[in-house]
Image: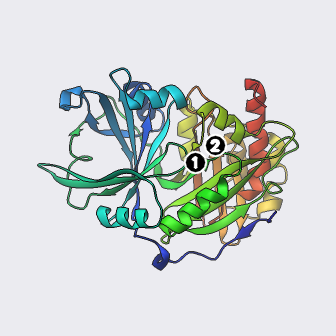
Amino acid sequence: MSTTATATAPTEALDTFPINGTDHLEFYVGNAKQSAIYYQATFGYKLVAYRGPETGSRETVSYVLEQDKIRLVLTSAVVPNHAVGEHVAKHGDGVKILALWVDDCRDAYAKAIERGAESAFEPYEISDDNGKVVMAGIKTYGETVHTLVERSAYEGPFMPGFIAKKSSFPVDPVGLKYIDHCVGNVELGHMNKWVEFYEKVLGFQLLVTFDDKDISTDYTALMSKVVSNGNGRIKFPINEPAAGKKKSQIEEYLDFYQGAGVQHIAVATDDILVTVQKLRDRGVDFLYVPEVYYEDLLDRVGAIDEDLADLRRLNILVDRDDEGYLLQIFTKPVQDRPTVFYEIIQRRGAKSFGKGNFKALFEAIEREQELRGTL
């Protein structure tokens, strides 16, 4: 089995088609209205658009939330036996769509299909007085879909069918800037299949490989490979379980989510101390790393600009690579099933993913698994 290896930085010329960035993440949830209030009140997202029965959508409702370059769409079914409701019944609240912002949707879709992608839906155009949006979809791991979104000719609040809508109470952003990376959990033996999918279909390159010697504790282990597009704006780590004495976090996720899906979303901030303090003050729960982690922290990572006492108080982790260092912290799952959670990350030059924190992080997850009786 290979050891940790960092691949040569990808070049934009290798991309199957240009991707400008993440257009949006769409969650299928049990109650979009209440989920929208949660993300506004705790994470500081502002409500910007709405679609529902009042706008002509008779079967689903969607709330669109934004913070800087991050856009979340929360969608629920309002009628029984709908695909959205069935998805929630099987998986719980979770990410259904990882939407990619492209310049030419039809061309991107054709190239993806030509390279072996399975179609989720063919290109179609929607329009209103604010312009037009073109979308198509290709399937990825589990029931997750990559929607390709072309929106250069649209000036409305989100896309046709939605109306502008503002938060009904004061919302204070916590400083989230953009999506740094999205992590997918897949079944045992499926990691390489999906890495090859991103390489072959989208022209992504392999950035880094972690084997079970890198990501393990006394009880559990997993393997991970990270793929990225040419401009580096899209990074997808793909995890699969590895053999261990007890059930790993990946296996727990697969059991509760009933298959492969998005495990966590890493969102970037320019000041993690301010961001995490605000999140903690609003009731967001984070994984706990014991005090002993900080005893030799500066010996391990060297000089940093932040005060160690502040990092210890907020339980923020630090790691360094050849490019610089990063600070990170992980929430507990944000819904009742132990599935989707968030990583808050601040990069001070580092381009890696916190390998030096893996052991502490996964021991923290194991403590939560033990409380749930799933370790």
Q: Amino acid at mark 1?
A: Ile
Q: Quadrant of the C terminus?
A: top right
**Residue located at (65% from left, 37% from top):** 254
Callout 1 touching callout 2 (CB < 8 Å): yes
Instruction: Give 287 or 200, whichever is nearer the viewer.
Output: 200
Q: Position of residue 26 (x, y in %)?
A: 41, 42
Residue neighbourhood size for the residue with mark 2, other residues' Cα within 10 Å, grouped as few (<14), some (14–19), many (≥20): many
Name above or below for residue 38 compared with residue 262: above
**Residue located at (76% from left, 40% from top):** 248
Q: Number of numbered discs present?
A: 2
In this picture, residue 364 sits left or right of residue 14: right
Residue, far left? 129
Sequence-earlier tag: 1 or 2: 2
Q: Amino acid at mark 2?
A: Phe
Q: Position of residue 311 (x, y in %)?
A: 69, 47
Disc 1 to disc 2, how far (Cα)? 6 Å
In this picture, residue 65 sits left or right of residue 311: left
Q: Using the image, tell me which numbered label, if any, was put on residue 306.
A: none
Location of mark 2 (residue): 330
Q: Quadrant of the N terminus?
A: bottom right
In this picture, residue 139 sits left or right of residue 106: right
Instruction: Give 188 or 373, whichever is nearer the viewer.
Output: 188
Location of mark 1 (residue): 344
**Residue located at (81% from left, 49% from top):** 216
Instruction: Give 278 or 205, whichever is nearer the viewer.
Output: 205
Q: Position of residue 199 (x, y in %)?
A: 55, 67
Q: Position of residue 94 (x, y in %)?
A: 50, 36
Residue, far top? 80
Residue neighbourhood size for the residue with mark 1, other residues' Cα within 10 Å, grouped as few (<14), some (14–19), many (≥20): many
Q: Does dot 2 land on a helix, a strand or a loop?
A: strand
Q: Quadrant of residue 66?
A: top left
Specify how the rendered protein is coloured: rainbow
